[in-house]
Amino acid sequence: MKSFYTFAFTAAGVVLGMLAGFAGKKKNKCRRWLTLVLVFGMAVCVSQAFVMAALNAAMANVSYAVFYISIDWLLYSVLGLCEDFTFQPPRRGVFKKVFFWYYIFDSILIATDIFTDIVYSVKAVESSGTIFYVSEFHLLYQIHLAASYIISFVIGIVLVSKLFKVSTIYWDKYILMLAGFVIVLILDALYVFSDRLIDYSVIGYALAGVLFYYDVDVYKPRVLLGKMFRGIADNECDAILLFDTDNNCIYINERAKQFFRIFDGELDRCYEAMEELLSKSHIDRTTDYYNIICATKIEGVKFHLDIEFHRLRRSGREIGYYYHIQDKTADIEALEKGKYLASHDSLTGLYNRDEFYHLVRKRLNEEKETEFCVVAADVKDFKLLNDVFGSHNGDVVLQKISDFLRGFFDDSAFVCRITGDRFCAFLRRDDFDEAALKRDVVKILDVNDINYPLSIQFGVYFIDDTELAVSQMIDRAFMAIAENKEDLRNRIFYYDSETKEKRYFEQRLTGDLLDSIAKGELKIFVQPQCTADGKIRGGEALVRWDHHSEGMLNPEKFIPLFERNGMISYIDRYIWEMAAKTLRKWKDSGFADRYLSVNISPRDFYFVDIYDEFHNLVKKYDIAPSQLKLEITETFMINDIDRKQFILDELHKDGFIIEMDDFGSGYSSLNLLKNLPVDVLKLDMGFLYKARDMDRCRKIIRIMIELAKELDMTVICEGVDDESQVHFLDSVGCDIYQGYYFSKPVPLSNFENLLDIPAKL
């Protein structure tokens, strides 16, 4: 019996060693761990064979040490194999490191046990006249055994948890590995808790190693591959039919069954169905491969099919053939639709911008002697309409406008939707009829289910320069609308020399701004802010542009332009810097109690870090935050309210004084007043005194000042132009006055000369 087990263990080790050699040559993800499993499995078997063949206790002791150490690293390798094989995430990395270092320690203990006998000891036992060397376990071996069962439990969890995560098609793959592992555990447990002299569980290690090798290198790439290919074919969106050499259908996937209306048990119909499908196709049926696209009807539905035929051969002899059928109906229809969409707007059916540019340029090149024009159309306040009535009704409006434009202009015109609610038409100049357009456009001003006064404005550019880019021609037509946006009496506007000159003027200013700032052409003007008796308390910093070619420009000439294009932040930052620098000079001259108010544009919040900007200025010039007052307007808070309010709150906490300009001129002043940290209200007398009923106007002013006083706010009245206004405002409690009665805005140097004297000139 002893000789038999020695031979069996040796043979098992040889088999595992051979498999380890084969596995090491493979090029797959699990190669390294599988090879280690087989190598350590071989070591387990061979070392146990040496135990059987041991001639004395010392030889058996060494063999047992190799045996136990091999089991340690075999289990560690099985864990690594399972994690790679199941593609587990690396979350167990720390756990595996703990086992690695434990097994290093355990291996050292077992290796030194040859001399210490602290883990196990070897004794000779006689049975039926044969001497067996068996190991007696000590306390440290129990720890070794417990660690082995813990890592075995982890391996089992890895495999079982994977079963719950994958499709049943993969179950065989993981059950095979789990079965091999369970066999080893059962045999090992039976041996450990029995009185057997021979560790027959070693055969289980060999069997598990063979199963692991089969699972990784045979089952996975071959058996599983076949299952997956069949699953892929069954779920393939294309039809696949496979025939033998006698024209019998041996396989048809689910898509082919649906396509040909063939059910299980009706495979004999497949050949007839294919023959009928190919009957009108002129192809050479004797070739090994052909590919055709044909149109056919199946149960009254038209299909475009891409049919691919392959004849299968092995060793030069035919073994069958198959058809691969793709339904190209959607692709062909999409191609036709794509050609249309590539040149047309999907919502309105008009030409899109790119196609419009192409057609216009082509027409201009072909008809050089013809005069043309571009007509732009823009829906006034379309965004508001879209927000109030919904995008669906907005789309209805756009479609109605497109239908009108398509019908109004003749077939020789090109009409396109540029973007959003902007349309454009290109036509011969002689074909443009202004009177007819004014007359007929009213047909689209009423839209069902929308109680909204729809307004459409048209801009016309008579092309006088055919070399211009088409986009520039369109811009000029829309420019005519933009210049007259607030003209509600007319609908049609023309691009003319005045519009052109204004655009060129704005372009020049835009191009000159940064250079002018660098050269100091932007000047600070200050309008004094005084008490009723003319004592100057401070002033509002205003800007003038001493342009090198245009002369001195007032703010209305350039501020609206830079508000629109976002470059206002360059001007404001320059003025803020100059104001802070001036305040420092005043401080050094003994006028630290004077202040300057600077304006903050709503656009500044999108281009400048307001908080950092002002903090850096007061720190740089060592001035009090209260000297540099920050002036905002009601329109300042139209958008992004929460963010702006937060920044103003932080500035106010740090000592900056917040002024609200033009208070009362808007519709939401009181709503803003309850939320914003406003210290100063500025009332515009010019606005209020435009009222027809002056008595009502004075009552409103009195109430507004009383409100400010209740809120502990300072009141500045600007636009004070005569003595009667001063007397009235003084009687109702106004604190500070600003206006032409005291002084117009003056250059900074002139203002500094006024600091010691009454401001009235």
Image (cartoon, rainbow, N blue to C red):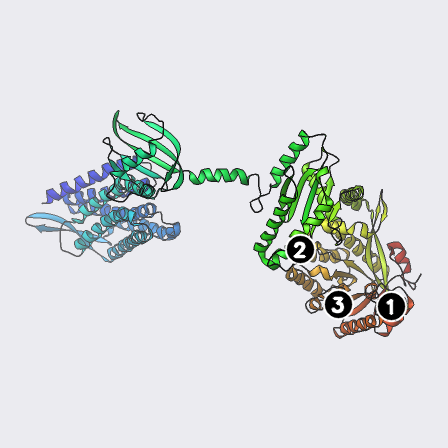
Q: Amino acid at mark 1?
A: Thr
Q: CA distance from mark 2 to mark 1?
A: 50 Å
Q: CA distance from mark 3 to mark 2?
A: 42 Å
- Tags 2 and 1 in contact by the CB under 8 Å rule? no
| In the foreground, 669 or 394 | 394
- Tags 3 and 2 in contact by the CB under 8 Å rule? no
| In the foreground, 377 or 676 | 377
320 relative position to 390: left or right:
left
Where does the image place residue 494, in percent across and percent down from the top left? 76, 44
Is 532 rendered above or below residue 419? Answer: below
The structure residue drawn at horizontal position 69% and vertical position 36%, both measured from the top left corner, is 469
Tell me which label, 1 or 3, sits earlier in the chain. Answer: 1
Q: Residues within 10 Å of mark 3 (few under 14, many from 20)?
A: some
Where does the image place residue 448, in percent across and percent down from the top left? 60, 57
The structure residue drawn at horizontal position 81% and vertical position 52%, both measured from the top left corner, is 555
Residue 416 visible? yes
The structure residue drawn at horizontal position 15% and vertical position 56%, both measured from the top left corner, is 194
The residue indicated by pointer 2 is 454
18 relative position to 482: left or right:
left
Residue 354: image tag: none
- Tags 1 and 3 in contact by the CB under 8 Å rule? no
Q: Amino acid at mark 2?
A: Leu
Q: Residues within 10 Å of mark 1 (few under 14, many from 20)?
A: many
Task: Name, please, the residue furthest toward the left.
Answer: 128
431 relative position to 327: left or right:
right
The residue indicated by pointer 1 is 531
Tell me which label, 3 or 2, sits earlier in the chain. Answer: 2
Question: Which quarter of the figure has residue 755?
Answer: bottom right
For mark 3, give the secondary structure: loop
